Amino acid sequence: MTTALAGKVAIITGGSKGIGSAITRELASNGVKVVVNYNQSKESAEAIVNEIKANGGEALAVQADVSYCDQAERLVEETKKQFGQLDILVNNAGITRDRSFKKLGEEDWKKVIDVNLNSVYNTTTAALSHLLEAEAGRVVNISSIIGQAGGFGQTNYAAAKAGLIGFTKSLALELARTGVTVNAICPGFIETEMVMAIPENVREQIVAKIPARRFGHAEEIARGVLFLCQDGSYITGQQLNINGGLYM
Ligand code: NAP
């Protein structure tokens, strides 16, 4: 395959489901060797790896709960062992534990911060030396419109996703001279299990407020990741909003 990204190696955390699976497929179909990280979804990780291999690509599934430093380190080590390099890190893994603040317990606060924000420290710190060795290293953090605008019942998630934006800008500043770019994508409401878990009547109210009058598709986020990785050598520290006009 002769795309600009052919032969590059990417880790996609939470790469077997929802937005992550669309990113995995998009990068793989552009010749990237993909490491599909999963925590619980072994079957879907193996299925997507088999699908990519059947299409002539290279892929590896690696179980790791990226909210733990040692597991994130192992994820990066296994990537290096299998493919010998690491060019692209997509920090996509995320969860919600929505509760109004009055009802939000410490466990739900900490879990969401651990999985959505501390995981990004864990993977990025493990990956950094390899990204610096790469010709044009890329970090893409999947943040959220909720980190920009807030969300009812989402103080934990909004804090994590806003934190990710600050992290992105600061690391981008530190790495700009090295050629490694660091950007965030802020999706609006995208049709995945995470959004389909919202009660139908609430979903209808959300769609009515989206200027584009529909939820986004995971593939639309994946094409944003491809753009930043492929054509983004002069784009760093940015938030790419893919939200149907919901937040401008
Ligand atoms: P999803 O379908 O629920 O998928 C979440 C993914 O994260 C799964 O692959 C899951 O893997 C992985 N994950 C969760 N905890 C993990 C852990 N501790 N270690 C490793 N992987 C873990 O959600 P999605 O909608 O695709 O969301 C993907 C990202 O986009 C998230 O960061 C989310 O916050 C963000 N986002 C989504 C929307 C939306 O509307 N859907 C909007 C804005 C931002 P396992 O199943 O293997 O545990």
Image: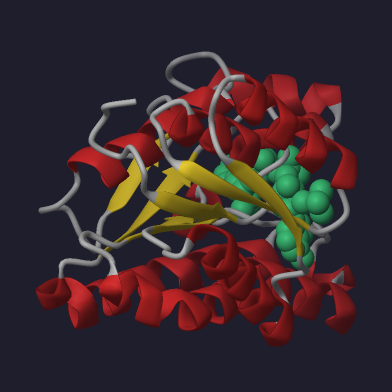
Q: Residue furthest top?
A: 213
Left or right of 150: which side holds 222? left
On the image, the x and y values in percent for residue 203 come to 73, 26
Is residue 53 positioned above or below 165 on the image?
above
Give the residue drawn at x 25%, y 56%.
238
**If the image is split into quadrants, where does the C terminus sit?**
top left
17 displayed left or right of 243? right
Q: Looking at the rendering, which quadrant does residue 122 occupy? A: bottom right
Describe residue 103's horizontal placement relative to residue 94 as left or right: right
Q: Using residue 138 as the reference point, say whether residue 175 is left or right of it.
A: left
Residue 182 image position (x, y, % from top left):
30, 63
How many numbered discs sit on the rendered protein? 0
Location of residue 140 in the rendering, given as x and y in whole percent from the top left corner: 40, 55
**Is residue 95 in view from this perspective?**
no
Image coordinates of residue 162 in percent, x first then y, are: 48, 66
239 to 50, vertically: above or below: below
Question: Residue visible at 88% across and 79% down?
Answer: 107
Q: Quadrant of residue 52?
A: top right
Q: Determine the residue positioned at 55% across, 24% down.
A: 56
Seen at 35% across and 69% down, the residue is: 168
- Is residue 62 in view? yes
Of residues 228 and 73, the one nearer the viewer is: 73
Quadrant of the image containing the N terminus: top left
Rendered position, 122 above or below 144? below
